[in-house]
Amino acid sequence: MDSLVAHGVEKIFGNPGTTESPLIDSLADYPQLQYITALHEGVAVGAASHYAQASGKTAAVSLHAAPGLGNGIGMMYGALKANSPIIVTAGQQDTRMRLGEPALGHDLVAMAAPVTKWSVQPESADEIAHIMRRAWKIANDAPAGPVFIGLPIDVLEQETDVAATAPSRLFANTRPDPEGIAAIAAMLAKTRRPVIIAGDDVGRSRAQDELVALAEAIGAEVWHELLHMHAPLPGRHASARGPLPADAAGIRKALADADAVLLVGGVFFEDVWYAAGSPFPDAALVAQVEESPVLLAHKQAIDIGLIGHLPVALAMLRDAVGEIPEAADRNAQLRARKDADNAAQRDRAARGWDRRPASMARVMAEIAQVMPPDIIVVDESITASIDLARSLPISGTGGYYGARGGGIGQGLAGALGVKIAQPDRPVLAISGDGSAMYSIQSLWTAAHHDLHIVYVILANREYRVLKHNLDFYRQRFEAGSNHPYAAMDLNGPALDFVHLAQGMGVSAVRVEDPDALGDALRRAFDSGKPYLIELAVEGKP
């Protein structure tokens, strides 16, 4: 507990259990530590991961023995993929019972190791302070990620003279090599069609302004990864193109005319489908800028690689490229294309305006009309995500949080962490109905801690994305079938999110007529309480 306080922890996300009794019993002595109670361990981890992203702080999580850790592992995988610095602990049974294989006991260190940067269990109380200090360092070393600490109940009850220590002051941001800056700047200065692909580290390092300045200086369009936690640019910026496709062939097609590609702060790439060949056009030069050497040239062959703190590296690149005469024309072309894309999205919404149930394009247009200007959007809309990105005025870094790793249920849980990290900003969580059911217990935590989050559940009563993926599978593997979509419908019985929410203390309403959506959203934003809107939307044609 002293180590948590020394390292600046203010919140512990958790679900209590018997082996955590020493921690729970100590809370009364540490009033500066608030315990955020979740009804499922996955919710606790998901909330902590988004809290770390939205606050810039390292989050603490307390889980319960082997089953509780097992429940949290899916969200720990998401935190690992999102590079969220979180310290996950789990109470362990008394070590004197180990050979007797007690109830709830298992090898927690082995369970957690595949989804963490470090997994460890102290052998004595003398090790706890050292382990906690090292855990914070490892969790925050680039690329950041979760660390797991198993806490045997008898070790927690031991006495020790080894006191908790404050974290070391580590100035770990690397200044880029000037020769690398010059090499990439020279590449960008002579390109005729530059493309930037931005990863989540742009958002985590708060380098959005520097990315915008560089993109405008060279007249580059900016893409981002398909699965992303942050929006690297404001969605309505002329350079913003959106997410790249799910395989190498699709990425290569999207970048077809590029002769220079700059990768900035990401894993590049997490493909969903196999496709042969490089994701880059044959003639394109490729440079990469990362904060960690672990990611540099890890998956892709590149021409130039550079390590450096992203805000500094991007600012140095902007200065080094100087004034490029062709950039103004490129930026004008990008603005014209963005205007055309916006017009096309408005036309798309208009064409489906009167459909019942509501079209995804209309839903997002309605939300855009009433959402507060300083809102944070937590997005797990999945098949509606393209309409969301093209319709909502996302502000970029700090205004949008998605989900990494591909595991569903992160939206409802993550909104808790975002709201706790940013209590003075309105938070809108948009989720599909299938995803919402993975972490529906989040609603109770929102009510219990009085968190004003507006939840919009897109209820098409199906796993729509899986139907699309089944179509892709049939096409890619020439399956030659046209069978029904087995096990992908959520009817019989239909899910009732209004009663689910009300049963957990959250006000809720179901909207069948899209004409009523605007008023329902206004009431939700004005309520000052957690509020859920179950919205009937169209399914897969």
Image (cartoon, helix red, strand yellow):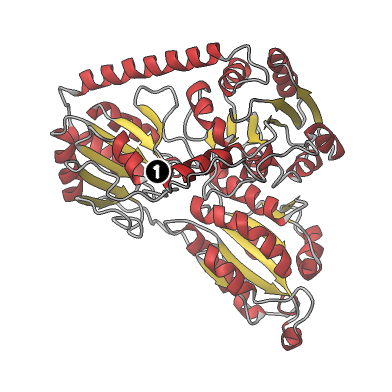
User: Quick check: 341 above or below 21?
Assistant: above
Mark 1 residue element: loop
User: Quick check: 324 above or below 517?
Assistant: below
Q: Which residue is mark 1?
A: 199
Q: Position of residue 435 (x, y in %)?
A: 65, 42
Q: Quadrant of the C terminus?
A: top right
Residue drawn at x 22%, y 45% as measured from the top left: 286
Lateral position of residue 67 relative to residue 203, left or right: right
Q: Position of residue 411 (x, y in %)?
A: 63, 41
Query: Crowding near pointer 1: few (<14 within 10 Å), some, many (20+)?
Result: many
User: Quick check: 289 above or below 241?
Assistant: below
User: Quick check: 67 above or below 182?
Assistant: below
Q: Position of residue 53 (x, y in %)?
A: 54, 45
Residue drawn at x 27%, y 30% as measured from the top left: 220
Residue drawn at x 27%, y 16% as measured from the top left: 332
Lateral position of residue 68 relative to residue 277, left or right: right
Residue flagged by tag 1: what amino acid is it?
Answer: Gly
Q: Quadrant of the N terminus?
A: bottom right
Along the line of sight, the residue nearer the viewer: 383 or 326: 383
Lateral position of residue 398 relative to residue 493, left or right: left
